[in-house]
Amino acid sequence: MEYQQNSDTPFPFGWCPPEVLLSRKYSNASDVWAFGVTLWELFSCGENPYAGMNRQEVLEYIGKERLKKPKNCSEEIYKIMRKCWEYDAAKRSNWLVLADALQDCKFPIATAIMPSTMHGYGFVDTKVGHGYIVINDVYVKSLI
């Protein structure tokens, strides 16, 4: 299925693949690209992809490069992102492949044995007995 934007309504070009930037044609493949950028945002703790670039600059950039791996992102997750960013829409991952790949990602869970405050991109106050997801030995997210 493919759909096309007909108005001049502004759109978030930082999340758009080349075919959308060139012709405003949307599809499942363009949604997969946007999902990859959203994953990148998550692991970069909310950074703005292509910060300061206009539509033409983003198009030129993605013609030869991809967003760099965020500091707290595993190689496993970054590979998933990269599969979302295939320039040729026909070569991009699909939703079933992405779902399988994400389910295969295993993050260690640590249980706090003493209270503490950790500093990273924010503060995490650990509580004894609570479980925490550990990402790359750096970022910790409470399960509660």
Image (tube, rainbow, N blue to C red):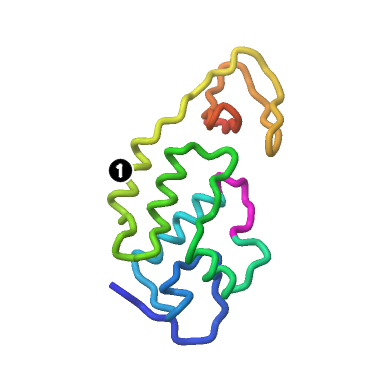
| Dot 1 amino acid type | Asp
The residue most toward the front is 64
Residue 50 sits in which quadrant? bottom right
Question: Does 19 lie within the magenta span?
Answer: no
Rendered view: 15 above or below 24: above
x and y, in percent, of residue 101 in the image = 34, 42
Horizontal side of 108 relative to 103 (left or right) equals right
Q: Which residue is rendered at x = 30% and y = 56% of the image?
A: 94
Instruction: Decide which of 48, 116 is in the foreground and name it.
Output: 48
x and y, in percent, of residue 79 in the image = 42, 45
SS of the residue at dot 1?
helix
Rendered view: 122 above or below 85: above
Horizontal side of 70 relative to 2 (left or right) equals right
The magenta segment is 42-49
x and y, in percent, of residue 2 in the image = 32, 75
Q: Which residue is rendered at x = 71% and y = 30% of the image?
A: 119
Instruction: Decide which of 99, 52 is in the foreground and name it.
Output: 52
Q: Mark 1 points at which residue?
A: 100
Q: Which quarter of the rendering shows the C terminus?
A: top right
Q: Which quarter of the rendering shows the N terminus?
A: bottom left
Q: Which residue is rendered at x = 53% and y = 23% of the image?
A: 131
x and y, in percent, of residue 59 in the image = 52, 70
Provide the major secondary structure of the magenta segment: loop
Rendered view: 94 above or below 45: below
Q: Which residue is rendered at x = 57% and y = 33% of the image?
A: 141
Question: Does 44 lie within the magenta span?
Answer: yes
Question: Are there few (<14), some (14-19), or many (20+) residues within 10 Å of tag 1?
Answer: few
Rendered view: 56 above or below 40: below
